[in-house]
Image: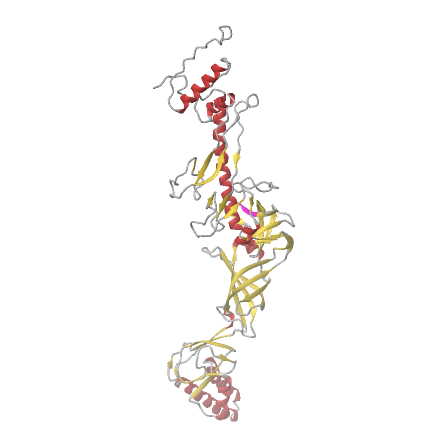
Amino acid sequence: MSDATKIPETPAPVVPRRRGRGALVLAAAVLVGAALGGGAVVLAGRAGGDGADGAAAAAAGQKPAEAKPLYQCPMHPSITQDHPGDCPICGMKLVKVAAAAAPAVAAGAATAGTAATATATKPQWTCPMHPSIVQDHPGDCPICGMKLVKMEPLSAGAPASGPTPEGLSTVTIEPARQQLIGLRTTKVSEGDVGGAWRTAGRVAIDETRVHHVNVKVGGFIEHDHATFIGKMVQKGQPLFAMYSPDLVAAQQELLVALRTRGELAGAGAAQDGDSLVAAARRKLELWDVPAQEIARVERTGEATKNLMFYSPATGVVTKRDVVPGMRVEAGSMPYEIVDLSRVWVLADVYETELQHVSVGLRATLTLRAYPGKKFQGRVAFIDPILDPKTRTAKVRLEFPNASGELKPEMFGEVLIEGPRRRGLVVPADAAIDSGTMQVVFVAMGGGTFQPREVKLGEGDGRHVEVLEGLHAGEEIVTGANFLVDSESRLRASLAAMAGGAAKAPAKAAGTGATGGTADPHAGRGGK
């Protein structure tokens, strides 16, 4: 080669000493710049494709570094890092969830302070019973052992047709998984709203139909005809026979008054005799001696040792405190008889529903003891005092019980019926109450379910009125909605974490391009 064709030698620039991979990248960049005639500009910074080094690599035509995967704790989504390991809270092994792409800055196409980011989506597997268990490969659930099912990527799903509540995300569930978790749906429809309130009721005795049998004079029980508690007695049926010296004396007084009246009638003083007989008879009546016993004494003219006492009403013996031969004192109550031809049902009504309950409303009682049978009654009384513990008021309902099927202490379901109106209704278990809002999941088609905040109105325990948030004909989730809610919250949390991780390198790339954050070691010599 001649001297004319020789390329003049270019002295190699002096390169400051750098340590590690950064020094090698900087030296290589300087040599490339020298080979190109010194026209290339090299930005000093860290190696690896992020920050200033990423911008320098893009300017030099180099391929940016590949995205790093993210690892997250299934039980604590806030724990995220770029390398495998264990959760510092629960010790569970971190699982790979997504990969944040490195920011790329194209020459002449980048906007100052911004960089393009991309989030790689990979298939994931989760447990149908424990949605917090998520991993990037098939396997079994470490909690219950159930086989993991494949999830749709976070970016999958149809766009929401309305605002999504905070902390929730639209989810897509495969048909096979829907069947596995027991997911059911129903359509929003119009129905009767209000006018019916369900509550639990307890059958009780009618306190106005309780009869106490007591004695006004001391004596001895000779015969007991109501021999056990629970026996049904009829009005006028014999209960017990009692011997009392006072009653024998009272009978003798009546007989004497009758004889005296006859003598006074012959002397022309019949009126005085009638007064004596009436006084003697009145004494026996005040001691509750039955009228037929008094008539027998007057008819036979003999005092009887034992006087029979009869039942004052038809009913069931609920109390018996005597046995034959027992002495009773004046004022004792040997028997209690309850008429069960009409009973009460005591129900609890919450204070928020008291405005809809009034005396006279119809009520329906259903019991497990009689499936398919309904008993009709009415509201008879509303307790004016609220129970401070349960925040409910006792409502007394009256039910006829001629057949005796309603027995005290039975429990059943009471439906109080009032005026009704038309409105949108959904099953009561379709709405999930988080304390601050009510959410339902709307089926958007293709296995996609969108969370929707709704405003609820009155309900009867089975159905509830929807005031805002839904339209007639929309299909909502009624079964396994708590599992859908868990997965929606999990995906929203993972999406938020992945979005926050993707913003960090973009911000670093933007500041590196403007020279705001350069490697503190750039331009300095080092050992």
| Residue that sits furthest to the front in the current view | 1
Give the percent coordinates (x, y) of residue 70: 46, 36
- Residue under the point 51% across and 8% down: 5
| Residue that sits furthest to the top in the current view | 4
Residue 257's place in the image compared with 155, above or below, is below
Is residue 246 rendered to the left or right of residue 483? left
Q: Is residue 439 magenta?
A: yes
Give the percent coordinates (x, y) of residue 437: 53, 45
Residue 320's place in the image compared with 252, above or below, is above
Most common secondary structure along the magenta stretch: strand
| Residue that sits furthest to the left in the current view | 527
Give the percent coordinates (x, y) of residue 136: 48, 42
Image mark count: 0
Coloring applied to the structure = secondary structure
Give the percent coordinates (x, y) of residue 200: 52, 62
Decide if residue 170 is in sight here.
yes
Q: Is residue 125 magenta?
A: no
Residue 35's place in the image compared with 172, above or below, is above
Given residues 40 and 174, the one toward you in this image is 40
**Which quarter of the figure has residue 195?**
bottom right
Given residues 245 and 521, the one toward you in this image is 521
Quarter that holds the C terminus: top left
Decide if residue 434 is in sight here.
no
Is residue 81 rendered to the left or right of residue 381? left
- Residue under the point 50% across and 83% down: 237
Which span is picked out in magenta?
436-440
